[in-house]
Image: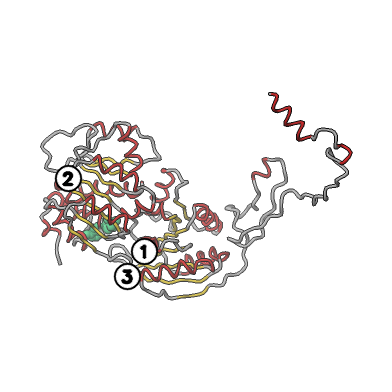
Amino acid sequence: MQKFSDLQLKEQILKNVLNAGYETPTPIQAQSIPILLEGGDLLGIAQTGTGKTAAFTLPMLQHLSDRQFSLMSCEPRALILAPTRELASQIKEQLDKYGQGLKLKYAVIFGGVGQASQVAALRNGLDIVVATPGRLLDLMNQGHCRLNRVEIFVLDEADRMLDMGFINDIRKIIPKLPAKKQTLLFSATMPPEIATLAAKLLHNPKKVEVTPPATTVERINQRVIFVSKAHKYQLLRKILKEESTELTLVFTRTKHGANKIVDYLNMHQIGCAAIHGNKSQSAREKALEDFKSGKIKVLIATDIAARGIDVQGVSHVVNYDLPVEAESYVHRIGRTARAGKDGSAISFCDDSENDALHRIEKLIKLKLPRENFIGVPEASVQSSRPDRPYRDPRAQQRGGRPAPRSEAQPGEKVIHPPRYEHAPKAPRDPNQGPNKPDDKNKPKVGFRFRQKKERY
Ligand code: AMP
């Protein structure tokens, strides 16, 4: 087996890698680092969890660390584009770790926060910018960032960029890069749009494929549990209680669904938090920190927010809702069984999700073991304070009576009676009203109104 010391890395970088606790390079590192140190372009087919970030950051740090000149204001030397704030922050964290003692300057640029500190960092000059496409484009349009001196360009998680609708931003950024540069594109899957983009962007690239697309990691114990929508809450609680879970990442399709699970688990004294697009950056960071440190054992996330989450020790991934896109299943379950550990992926499947399950099994070419769960009636989940019954605060603001606590089962759709009941309309009497038969000679009401209107 290859060692890091065989990879021609600088002594300082080697030291940093060993300090990070890595003993041997992962397959993507072993294959990519020599290609990148020679300066070639690279197409990496790899999902998160394979060690791909170190595969591109280590050679990048090595190239840039020989700098003999001062940095130019607003003109970074390397650009890493990532689809989410979380992923961008994690790449920056890894640069900090592997780049210790190299005296290089990095900054991370993403939206949802003020731009002042990002602009100041760009003005002071940077070796590496890690950015999400939207904010970068915004700062470029404002004249705070120019890409004409970029020596190394990395497009990370290109397939997610496409899913998240960033592909047009990327198409606008690419022409601003110089023709002569080293380019790396990483993607877990290769949909046609990404293949076309890769063909345009990369020059004689070497292809490195570590986990073939559409296969799942073998160390993950996968299973499906059939359950009604209403009993998914209960099933989740049962799993958290009865299985030896360490850290559990729960995926939901919607932000609202994630919030409701938090309410339910809190009601049952299970500490957890949600991360999704409606949460502020600081709330997302806090939730992730608490999860990483083990302060909370359960994190509920939507696909987009979970992108780039890299937490060691996730023992279970629960697909509370099956993803509509089968590829997302592969991304989701890849959050467990990291760094040589085993993991479990449990997928809940209700009546409406059979097609999604079928698509997943077709993609991963595996029929997942099946179980059934039949729940029992349980109290409502609407209150996050078990000691207080749920009251609709809007009803009280309106001065009305608080709404009674719902008797619905958790997750069950509550059908409310209509708020106002109208008496059925009586059929119109032709002898009554403004246009009754003996009013024939008078102008019709509607007609009079039209005449009046025309005069103005
Ligand atoms: P990534 O695929 O880049 O998201 O990395 C997944 C995780 O693997 C990160 O937490 C890294 O710190 C870790 N990692 C990267 N390279 C190695 C290595 N050679 N040995 C052990 N862990 C690693």
Q: Nearer the viewer, residue 60 or 288?
A: 60
The nearer-to-camera label among 3 and 2 is 2
The residue singled out by tag 2 in the image is 181
Q: Quadrant of residue 328?
A: bottom left
Crowding around mark 1 (Cα neighbors within 10 Å: few <14, some 14 to 19, many 20+) is many
Task: Check disc 3: other Cα within 10 Å, few if <14, some if 14-19, many if 20+.
Answer: some
Question: Residue 287 at what x, y percent from top left?
Answer: 42, 50
Q: Marks 3 and 1, Cα distance to the nearest angstrom?
A: 13 Å
Q: Are marks 3 and 1 in contact (CB under 8 Å)?
A: no
- Which residue in the structure is indicated by mark 1? 330
- Tell me which label, 3 or 2, sits earlier in the chain: 2
Q: Amino acid at mark 3?
A: Arg
Which label's residue is closer to the chain start, 2 or 1? 2
| Residue at x 14% of width, y 49% of height | 12
**Distance CA(mark 3)–CA(mark 2):** 38 Å
Q: Nearer the viewer, mark 2 or mark 1?
A: 2
Give me the residue at 32% from left, 31% from top.
Answer: 142
